[in-house]
Amino acid sequence: MKELEKNLNGTGLRIGIVLSRFNSEVGEGLLGACRAQLLQQKVSEGDITLASVPGALEIPLVLQRMAQSGKFDALIALGAVIRGDTYHFEVVANESARGVSEVQLHTGVPVANAILTTDTDAQAIERMHIKGGEAALVAIEMVNLLRGLA
C-alpha cells in the first residue's frame, strides 16, 4: 500500500489569508499565531498575502477571487463569530462556513477555515492562538497532499 505522508514543509508555498475585522482582538490573535506558524514551516514572509474584510460573510468572496487568480497555493480564512442574543449568529456561522467550503470545492485550492464560532468572547480568546496556528498547518499539509496525488 502506498501511503502519502504528512508533509508540513512550506518552502516556496504562496499563501493567501483573508481576515475578518469584526471581533478584531480575536482576529489579530488568530493572525499572529497563523503568521508565526507559517514562518516556522518555512513559508517566506514575501509569499504571504493578507486581505481584510468587514466580517465573516465577506470572507468567501475574497477567498474565491484569490483562488481564481492562480497566485496562491492555499488560502486561510480567519475570523470570529461570537454568539449574541439573536438568530444572526447561526446565519453568519453557517453561511460563512458554507461559503468557505464551496470555494475550496469549486476551485481546487485548499482553504483552511479558522473562523471561530463560539458562545463567548472568552472562548474565542482562549482558542485564537491554537486555531490560528492549526490553520497554517492545515493549509500547508493540504497543498502538499494534493500535490502528492497529482
Image (cartoon, grey):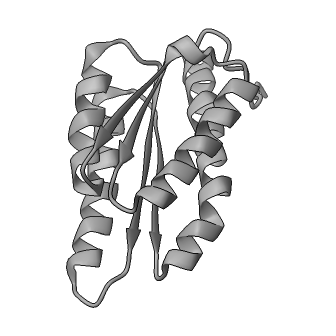
Q: Quadrant of residue 57?
A: bottom left
- Can residue 143 be seen here? The reply is yes
The percent coordinates of residue 100 (x first, y second) are 33, 46
Q: Residue at x 30, y 55 (%)?
A: 56
Residue with the most extreme top position: 12
Q: Quadrant of residue 136?
A: top right
Q: Is residue 80 above or below residue 46?
A: below
Q: Is residue 94 above or below residue 138?
A: below
Q: Residue at x 50, y 59 (%)?
A: 26
The percent coordinates of residue 106 (x first, y second) are 27, 33
Residue with the most extreme bottom position: 85
Q: Residue at x 65, y 47 (%)?
A: 134
The percent coordinates of residue 95 (x first, y second) are 24, 61
The percent coordinates of residue 4 (x first, y second) are 72, 27
In the image: residue 139, left or right of residue 74: right
Question: Which quadrant is the N terminus positioned in?
Answer: top right
